[in-house]
Image: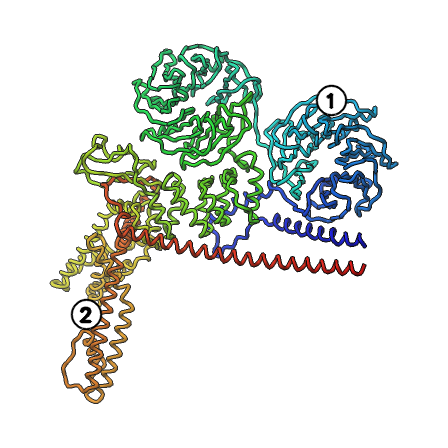
Amino acid sequence: MEELKTDILTAQPALFALSALVEKQVKITKKPTKKRQYKKPLTPQQIRLNEIIDEISEYIMGAAEDSLTTPFQIKCLALSRDNVNLFFGSSNGNIARYNRVQKNITDDIPLNVGPIYGICLDEISSKAFICGEDPIVRIYRLPRYELEFELKGHEQSVNSIRLGHTREFLYSASNDGTVKKWNLKTLENEGTIMQHVGKASSLALTVNGKYVFSGGADNLIRVYQLLHGQQILNLKSHNDCVKSLAVNSQSTFLASGSDDCTVILWNIEDFTPIRVFIDHEATIQALAFSLDGSILLTGSADFTIKVWDLAKERREITLNSHKNIINELIISPNQDFIISCSDDKSLRVWSFPQFLEEQVFKALENSFNSVVISPISSEVISCGTDKYVRWWNPTKDEACVLCETNGTSLKVAVAKDESWIAAGDDLGKIYLINYKEKKLEKEIQAHLGPVRDLCFSHDARYLVSGGGDSTVSVWHIEKLEATVLRGHLQSVWAVAISSDGETAISGSGDGTLRVWDVFKGKERYSAQSQEQISALQIDRQDRYVISGDLRGNVKIWSIYEKAIETDFNEQHRDCVTSIYVCHDNENFLTSSRDKTIYIFSLKYRVALSYLTRKQTIFSMAVSADEMLIATGEQEMIYFQENPLKSTKPRIVGPHEGLQKFIAYAKEVISDSGPEHDSSMDNFIILPYFFNILHIYAYYNFSSYLKQSLLQSSAPMVPSREGHTPMTITLLRKTRYSRDEIIKALYRFGKSSPFILLTLERDIFVLTKLGLPLVEELYKVLFQQASRHSLPKFCEDEEMILPIVNLSEHPRIKPVEFMDESLMGNSGKCICFMESYVKIALTVGSKESIDFLESLSKCKNNEIFRTPFIKSIIDYKWRQVGFMMKTLGGMYFLYLLIMCLYTAYFQGNVYFQSALFVFNVILTAFETFQLCVSGSHYFTYVWNYIDWTRSILVLVYLINSWSDVDMELNFSIFSLATFVSWIRGFSFFRIFSKTRYLTNMVVEVIKSITGFLVIMAYSTLAFTFLFMVLAGLHANPSFLSYLSVSYNLMLGAFDDGEYDIIEWTCITFALIVNPVVILNLLISIVSDAFDKVKSDSISADARELVDMIIEIENLMITRRGRNEKKFFQVCKEYEKDEEDEWEGKIREMQKYIEEIIENNEKDREKIIKLIKMQEREANEQSTKLDIVVHRMKKICEAEKII
């Protein structure tokens, strides 16, 4: 009965808990993506986005591990020969079988033997050998796990067992220090074959049956030769207990892992160590070889698994999803998956990770101070501490020495045309080597101190050098003459030269950056960096200098503005050693002694991601086709694929966290609710260039998105196909994520406006939607440039402002607005406005019309108050306004002819002909406008009026010339005249002084509808009342009484003889109609006036936009001129509207609305939390009831006993 109680208490709850967790896990891993439901058909953009996400999801799901969580620690593993069934032993003494294909547990058997430390399978004889905490090795019959025999002989726990290659013998290692051999036929102990001082921790056997290896607490690996039946050797290299051993299937290598955190690879043939792996930080608990012996797995108490490539010696891959000690590892025979178990109570099945393609050149006892790749042939040139300048064969790890320097080689450079190689040493000498002949031609004493940097001009005529003597020298290669540039106070550590060869730039230990005129040999200007500059590079357009300093700061300097534009100070943690600007001039790479290579966006001014190395990086170079990155390190040059050119699925980021990112991305994609991890923001999924923000945006993880954006850790840059997180939220119509991105862009845009360039594709959609936050974006999109280098005054008082400039670059260049001679310290006070999003502003272009139409459809009036939109509308109106005025002039000429005809020349054939001609011209114009505008034409009511007028005038003229009924014809002409005058009213929109009044008239007409209904009702009511009262007297017509009632509303009535009732009704009518109704009309007009006044700016802008669209639609020859430019303005300085009281009130109103919205969101969150707590409390209560119920059953069973 006691055994029965044990089964009740252990077996059933364990099986129940384990199965429940497995089912939950399988459910999670099988859920691929969120269901996508769209009410409307998908657009091509949405379809393409979904395809990309599906590809990324498939890659992530394939690369991520499947996990099985159990209630107990998993101590050991064994895989069946068909790779389907996985057996594992746990800390509670259970043995379980997991079907890897079906992802479910088929057996979970309590053996009641304590923790199980080892399992060996003999599938031919259907046996399982188990060892564990007690000193007995047990043999079980499969598949029912029937205990067949117990092997007794050890005195303490058995740590490891191994089955001999003939399956006739079993070997075991125990805490009692012995390694025993068991005969499985006779089931007898054949004795102790090895004895350790202290416990025996690990065992391994060669497949060929030649050796048995054991590791123990005496730090030794003991070698037992089976053929002679004796211990032949002790291998001693570890400094602590040898905890794990493994032998490859070829019986050529032995791997050993120890408490000293090292793994040693031994050659079994001569028992010598080949390699030592020191990358783990804790005890090596598990080891495993691949079937072909090319891969070694190591599992450690630092919770990580490392995958080592023994064949190609590529950089190891770290798997780090476990949360506790790794106990055992298995790699599948076909090398497609890895299995691991851990004390974190989980079992994980990993897809076999892919190694990066890489190449290594080695030179012992040498640090590669400088590495360059020739720009044409992509050959590698290096120099280092061994004083040799080497040329390397790109296809082999072979080198030829080009020359030996007298001092330590510090820098090497190659001419663009591959005519020369220059090397400099720490004795101040420059060595010129003929590239083609690969021989030293000239040796120059260039500086009195070390040659710190070298670079050739693009035409290879000049060589610029910086030295420890604080000078910069510009050498003419053919003449070997130097122009010495003096000005620095300390060593010159970095130099660069512009593409035209006219400008040299140098950085020094004195913390200054100096710009030199190469041909004049003079300093143009200097700028302060505050830190010692260690690396320099000029961008491909000669606009910027990128510098790195001793503390790891990376700065982008504007050559024109003579100042720092962007400062990256949170990336590198040590000296920046090299900088490379990509051919497209949009990205650049930096290397550092902190063992990292950062990828920066020069266009958007953000850090995209970074790569990590295991050694200090002394230099970096990129191949001519930009496919490879080479780094000079300690005793090696390391080549790896340039992630910016990758075409295969790959994840770029910190090497140690790659697998962690994959697991995290999988949980996000499968909606498993992982805890937000900001360290995941540093990864990019190639070749799509998606980062975690794109995934958050797609799946609408708005809270995660918000946290990442608040920490400013993930870049909001476009993917390879142009999808930004904002683009994705607009395509997916995810409101909360979209709003968080808008807020973040507004916040970032104030300090780093270049990030706003990402809005180029999305600004039209945002404008069309008219979201409440978009006007804030427009405020930062168009900023006043407040840099010190910009002029503050224009000496020409007569200059007409504003001046508009359309530029290819967002930053202002004052010379593009006015002559430099006009910029002074007095005169007209000016300021510059610059935009950070490109817009097509060519009048008549398709994209220009699209942008204007997005403004026209925008429901957010505040957008029209922003300086950006006001300036663009003003600029466009100045371009096309004359055409609208011409059209208005033509129409008023038409009205003049109609007036003269009506007043003086009715029936005159000549005037009728003139009316006909003008009508035909105006009708032709409307027809042309209809053809080019399409459906947009029908959005304006004035166009309907135009066609009505045109048809009426045409009908009148045809009837006049056909002598049709004149009375009817005059009626038609009167309607035509009326409609013509109404249409003429619309042309007052052209003029700013009358535009306000036309808006007010339109607004009054819109608002008066309700008033007219009330007035008509009141008038009719009193009409019928007077008809009733007059019934005793005369009986005039209904229209007569209606006229009396209407006149009463105007305060006019006859003072005839009325009785008391009639006077009472008239008095009441006089109060209601003239007083109440007219005051109501005055109130409506007043409200309309207030509304028009408050919205006068936006209403005025809308009218201008509509008229500009009308004109631009006519310019069909310009449709294809969609060049996008940055909009820049030089204007007279004026007080910002936001400083006025109206602007401040609007800002205050926005803040109040934002506070109310946030409070409402917080309230919803609190309600959700309360409901969640209530639900959890109910679940706990239910579980407690179950436990109480089970306890009662157990008590009842004990009473029965």
Q: Nearer the viewer, residue 243 or 306?
A: 243
Q: Quadrant of the C terminus?
A: bottom right
Q: Residue at x 52, y 25 (%)?
A: 616
Q: Position of residue 538 (x, y in %)?
A: 39, 27
Q: Residue at x 43, y 21 (%)?
A: 416
Q: Residue at x 39, y 33 (%)?
A: 567
Q: Quadrant of the N terminus?
A: bottom right
Is residue 1046 rendered to the left or right of residue 269?
left
User: Disc 2 designates what residue?
Assistant: 966
Q: Taking 204 as reference, is 944 above or below it?
A: below
Q: Which of the two discs, 1 and 2, labels the residue nearer the N terminus?
A: 1
User: Disc 1 designates what residue?
Assistant: 269
Q: Quadrant of residue 154?
A: top right
Q: Taking 422 as reference, is 900 above or below it?
A: below
Q: Residue at x 44, y 52 (%)?
A: 735
Q: Nearer the viewer, residue 482 or 554?
A: 554
Q: Taking 708 as reference, is 988 above or below it?
A: below
Instruction: Say what amino acid the circle numbered 2 marks.
Output: Met
Q: Position of residue 694 (x, y in %)?
A: 48, 44
